[in-house]
């Protein structure tokens, strides 16, 4: 059952071949068996899952149907879930029981999805390898000595190993697409504002966006409609109709123009990964798209800009963790300053503190103009590059990650090297564009991802192209042998 | 050489909304601690702010009423600092692009002179919570019911030259925000408070001196005293060769002194930046026009109208228009009595004194406008004398009844029957022949004696004018 | 750009982070490396370019002024480290 797609599981449920309770029990069982190895879940919510499943079965008996009714799902532990610990991978929130549901969680629940539990992640989503979690690193199902990518690494590992058919994730600079690439999954980051951020623990508010990790573009198309749409609780949520993403999957690709960015096949890209991505692009060409060489002249500045903007916003967003109303409080504070400082220093891990320090610095008097303001100006130039590109092409294709999954422990002592994991992805968040990563083959026996970037609100086109690619290839069907 | 004080005020007016600026929690006062602090006010992980439309409309009203520029695009920014009653570790405020800029307000002083005070800006922000320091011996309690209450911070130019000018300006703003209905003006509950920036310089100097900021003044009297104290303090330091340090000070209402606030010396770096959770607020001109149409008659216009329509002097007209409640009360009395001048007299003297004595606002006045009008009519038609009217007023104030029933019950109505008065006068003259002779011999000031005797018999209820008249005739 | 260990303590104070003895040195090294890296931004001329705070060109929506929230103090305070008489408790703050 765990090898079936969401649409196949839906068919099985619909035909009554399996109940949601049986399906859910199966995945809970797999989590029990395999997650000691993977560490992909922080909290498994057995009771809630079985209750959700029973309710879904009842709804189905009552004649309800929709794509996610009775389908188990894992939520990244960044989404608030009422009555369930929401840790964000941090000691700071180790005991925090969210008193409300994130909009994404609420929508999936009302669509009948079954919550299996909360997945591991880099602390406060800050990281590209899932090594910064207070709950320990997550292991890549394709090679458990390696990282699954991050920050949605727990969601990626869980879906890749068949512990969940589908999972939510979030992105700030590549945190869905990069782990999807490193674990052989399809991962979509929608347009900024397409999915509500309400109830998603904030990292960098102008970049954060929720999305889905799944085994195929089709599975994402089935579930994106459930979470997308306007939310009056999020001022940055866009009030614009949500299309039926499943309707546009099947048409052919002829006439589409796909841009290939020459800068993205140069310095820093693993050559085997490069070859695989080139091959995938050739496949698209065979499917009828025309290729256009384009340039994103400022794309090399995406990571520098990102590492000013994201820490700046984060330094402010994380000020609420002060040990007063919720979260970790240091023992026996002598005064209020001591309470603030020790609670925060004990509650936050090294990477989080490092980013708070950078963010505080770039916003501080005397440095604001040189760093924060400058970054926001360059951000506009990066966006303008994309806008110009989308005048010539419908989509942009390239590598998601410059390399495949690396060994646990690597890059942890070199922040800048770690930050370059997101060299192809972070610019998309700066511009608020939708993008996905789809499995494109194996380099060094590890999955590598094809990166597709669309113009604002072109999620449907991204899923369409990825689906056609997946009809022509079988990379997305490959499964890690260790987790049969 | 003489010194000159330079004062600017930052007034915080709490906007009179039902819900908070960025959340649907209630702003009502008097709730138990933290019962009106919702997830957004608490800054729980994952929550987001959405702007209250009424808050925006109120800020625009204020801007229009002060001839200010309404920003077509204004931005919310985060002001970052740590304090236990600041839930998010930042306050959502406005920094570079406030909603209101470059306004002005004409302020009239007690001597009738006027001055135009510049309003640099007015911006929207959220209030913080309240720290309770005196409830527990070694701990501070934090109540976040106030957190997220909408504030309009009104920043003046340093245009005032004395404590009295500052108070007059503050009163004018106070009057304006209540007219606009955007703030209840309740200073005891902190709905209207200010920080004063005070410096001194040699008269004639154009450069400003170094200023001190006196925080959180919540009464007109405190503003006056704190500024007076601070000006004197600064002059004394400068005259003895010292220099002023730029600092934040606190006013102690018990000693009447200002003192430096501990912990505020550390240079604060608020790291303002645009709040990424909130988008630019754009205002179209038709929206602004609609808001303009909803602005009621403002104090200056009302004063003019009272002078022309009711024939009042400027002083009375201003006193009656200081608050919209007083003006409404006055006009209700005039409508019911048709006596604009008497109504003005009663309201600015006896009624004002009684309200002041009992510490009441006019909207809590125990005497209804129609009752005061009835009392005035009884004076006009001669039912009671002015002296009696004061007694009736006091009785109505104590809610012993309405004026008519009190006059009837206590038999306070005036003796105005000419025949009765004639008889009374005859009786008095007959029983005091000696005084009658003396009067007729030229000692005319005895007239008062005869009047007194008539009043004595009637327990003060004889119509004094008619008694006078009869005495003149008969003597 | 290199940040001296001395300025690190000022930033840590603003961020309310406690620094141990070797933290100053380490942060100085790491932050300097990161800032040097991000200064690649200076290669591009941004004269006249408006800073971009939001990825989409949208304006702020408004909510009606209605009270939608009810009292959930007990539920919220279940997460609080210290509460008494409905107040969040912290060490004595002296103004």
Image (spheres, rainbow, N blue to C red):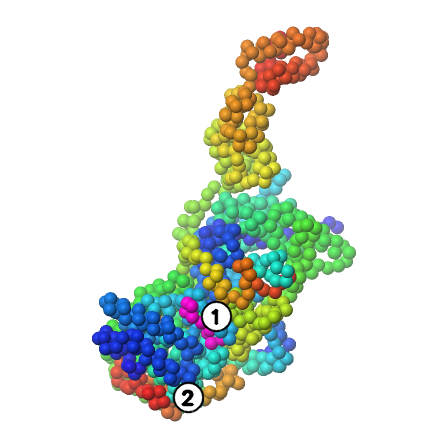
Q: Earlier in the sequence, mark 1 or mark 2?
A: 1
The front one of A161 and A189 is A161
Q: Residue A238, located in which quarter of the rendered image?
A: bottom left
Q: Secondary structure at mark 2?
A: loop
Q: Classify residue A372 as left or right of residue B140.
A: left
Helix, strand or loop under label 1: loop
Q: Which chain is disc 1 placed on?
A: A
Which residue is denoted by mark 1 in the rendering?
A96
> Residue A187: image x %, image y %?
36, 78
Residue A144, disc: 2
The main secondary structure of the magenta stretch is loop
Which residues lie in the magenta part? A81-90
Q: Percent position (x, y) of residue A70?
A: 30, 73
Q: Above or below — where is B453 with respect to B316?
A: above
Residue at 25% x, 69% y is A60
Residue lying farthest to the left in this orientation? A15
């Amino acid at each position: 059952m765990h090898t079936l797609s969401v649409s196949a599981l839906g068919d099985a449920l619909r035909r009554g071949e399996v109940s949601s309770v049986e399906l859910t029990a199966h995945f809970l069982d797999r989590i029990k068996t395999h997650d000691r190895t993977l560490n992909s879940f922080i909290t498994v919510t057995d009771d809630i899952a079985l209750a959700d499943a029973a309710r879904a079965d009842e709804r189905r008996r009552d004649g309800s149907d929709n794509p996610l009714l009775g389908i188990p799902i894992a939520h990244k532990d960044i989404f608030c879930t009422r009555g369930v610990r929401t840790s964000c991978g941090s000691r700071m929130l180790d005991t925090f029981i969210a008193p409300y549901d994130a909009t994404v969680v609420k929508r999936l629940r009302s669509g009948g999805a079954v919550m299996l539990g909360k997945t591991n992640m880099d602390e406060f989503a800050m990281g590209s390898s899932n090594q910064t979690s207070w709950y320990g690193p997550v292991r890549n199902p394709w090679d458990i000595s390696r990282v699954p990518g991050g920050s949605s690494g727990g969601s990626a590992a869980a879906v890749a190993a068949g512990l969940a058919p589908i999972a939510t994730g979030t992105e700030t600079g590549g945190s869905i697409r990069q782990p999807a690439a490193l674990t052989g999954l399809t991962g979509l980051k929608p347009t900024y504002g397409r999915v509500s951020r309400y109830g998603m623990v904030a990292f960098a508010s102008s970049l954060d966006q929720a999305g889905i990790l799944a085994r195929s573009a089709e599975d994402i198309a089935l579930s994106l409609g459930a979470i997308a749409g306007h939310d009056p609780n999020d001022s940055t949520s866009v009030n614009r109709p949500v299309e039926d993403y499943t309707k546009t999957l099947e048409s052919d690709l002829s006439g589409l123009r796909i841009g290939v960015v020459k800068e993205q096949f140069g310095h820093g890209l693993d050559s085997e990964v490069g070859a695989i991505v080139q091959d995938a692009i050739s496949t698209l060409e065979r499917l009828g798209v025309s290729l256009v060489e384009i340039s994103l002249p400022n794309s090399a500045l995406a990571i520098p800009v990102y590492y000013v903007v994201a820490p700046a916003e984060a330094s402010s967003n994380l000020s609420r963790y002060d040990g007063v109303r919720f979260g970790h409080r240091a023992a026996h504070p002598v005064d209020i300053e001591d309470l603030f400082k020790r609670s925060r220093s004990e509650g936050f891990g090294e990477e989080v503190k490092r980013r708070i320090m950078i963010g505080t610095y770039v916003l501080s008097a005397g440095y604001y103009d040189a760093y924060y303001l400058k970054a926001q100006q360059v951000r506009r130039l990066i966006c303008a590059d994309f806008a110009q590109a989308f005048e010539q092409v419908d989509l942009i294709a390239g590598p998601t990650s410059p390399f495949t999954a690396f060994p646990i422990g690597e890059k942890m002592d070199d922040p800048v090297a770690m930050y370059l994991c997101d060299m192809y992805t972070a610019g998309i968040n700066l511009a608020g564009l939708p993008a996905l990563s789809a499995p494109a083959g194996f380099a060094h026996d590890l999955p590598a991802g094809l990166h597709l970037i669309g113009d604002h609100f072109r999620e449907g086109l991204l899923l369409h192209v990825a689906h056609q690619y997946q009809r022509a290839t079988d990379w997305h069907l490959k499964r890690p042998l260790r987790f049969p | 050489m003489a010194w000159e004080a330079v004062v600017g005020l930052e007034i915080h007016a709490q906007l009179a909304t039902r819900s908070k600026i960025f959340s649907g929690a209630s702003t009502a006062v008097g709730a138990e601690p933290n019962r009106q602090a919702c997830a957004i006010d608490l800054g729980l992980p994952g929550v987001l702010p959405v702007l209250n439309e009424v808050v925006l409309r109120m800020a625009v009203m204020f801007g229009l009423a002060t001839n200010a520029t309404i920003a077509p695009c204004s931005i919310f920014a985060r002001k970052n600092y740590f304090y236990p009653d600041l839930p998010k570790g930042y306050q959502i405020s406005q920094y570079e692009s406030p909603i209101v800029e470059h306004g002005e307000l004409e302020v009239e002083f007690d001597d009738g002179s006027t001055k135009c005070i510049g309003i640099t800006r007015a911006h929207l922000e959220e209030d913080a919570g309240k720290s309770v320091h005196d409830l527990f011996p070694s701990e501070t309690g934090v109540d976040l019911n106030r957190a997220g209450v909408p504030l309009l911070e009104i920043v003046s130019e340093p245009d005032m030259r004395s404590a009295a000018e500052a108070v007059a300006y503050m009163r004018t703003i106070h009057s304006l925000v209540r007219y606009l209905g955007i703030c209840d003006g309740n200073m005891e509950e902190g709905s209207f408070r200010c920080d004063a920036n005070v410096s001194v310089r040699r008269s004639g100097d154009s450069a400003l001196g170094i200023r001190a900021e006196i925080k959180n003044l919540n009464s007109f009297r405190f503003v006056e005293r704190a500024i007076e104290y601070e000006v004197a303090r600064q002059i004394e330091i400068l005259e003895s060769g010292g220099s002023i340090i730029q600092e934040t000070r606190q006013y102690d209402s018990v000693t009447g002194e200002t003192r430096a606030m501990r912990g505020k010396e550390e240079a604060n770096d608020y790291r303002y930046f645009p709040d990424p959770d909130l988008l630019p607020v754009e205002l179209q001109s038709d929206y602004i026009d609609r808001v303009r149409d909803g602005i009621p008659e403002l104090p200056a216009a009302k004063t003019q109208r009272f002078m022309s329509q009711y024939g009042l002097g400027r002083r009375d007209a201003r006193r009656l228009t200081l608050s919209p409640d007083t003006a409404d009360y006055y006009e209700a009395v005039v409508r019911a009595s048709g006596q604009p001048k008497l109504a003005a007299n009663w309201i600015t003297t006896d009624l004002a004194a009684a309200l002041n004595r009992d510490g009441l606002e006019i909207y809590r006045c125990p005497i209804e406008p129609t009752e005061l009008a009835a009392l005035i009519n009884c004076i006009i038609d001669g039912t009671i004398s002015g002296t009696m009217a004061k007694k009736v007023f006091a009785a109505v104030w104590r809610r012993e009844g309405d004026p008519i029933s009190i006059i009837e019950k206590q038999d306070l109505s005036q003796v105005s029957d000419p025949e009765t008065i004639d008889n009374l006068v005859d009786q008095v003259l007959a029983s005091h022949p000696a005084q009658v002779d003396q009067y007729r011999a030229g000692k005319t000031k005895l007239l008062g004696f005869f009047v007194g005797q008539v009043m004595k018999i009637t327990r003060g209820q004889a119509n004094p004018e008619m008694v006078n008249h009869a005495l003149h005739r008969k003597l | 750009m290199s940040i001296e260990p001395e300025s690190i303590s000022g930033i840590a104070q603003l961020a309310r982070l406690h620094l141990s003895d070797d933290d100053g040195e380490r942060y100085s090294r790491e932050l300097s490396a990161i800032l040097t890296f991000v200064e690649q931004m200076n290669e591009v001329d941004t004269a006249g370019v408006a800073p971009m705070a939001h990825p989409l060109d949208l304006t702020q929506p408004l909510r009606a002024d209605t009270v939608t929230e009810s009292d959930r103090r007990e539920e919220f305070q279940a997460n609080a480290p210290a509460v008494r008489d409905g107040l969040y408790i912290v060490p004595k703050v002296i103004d």
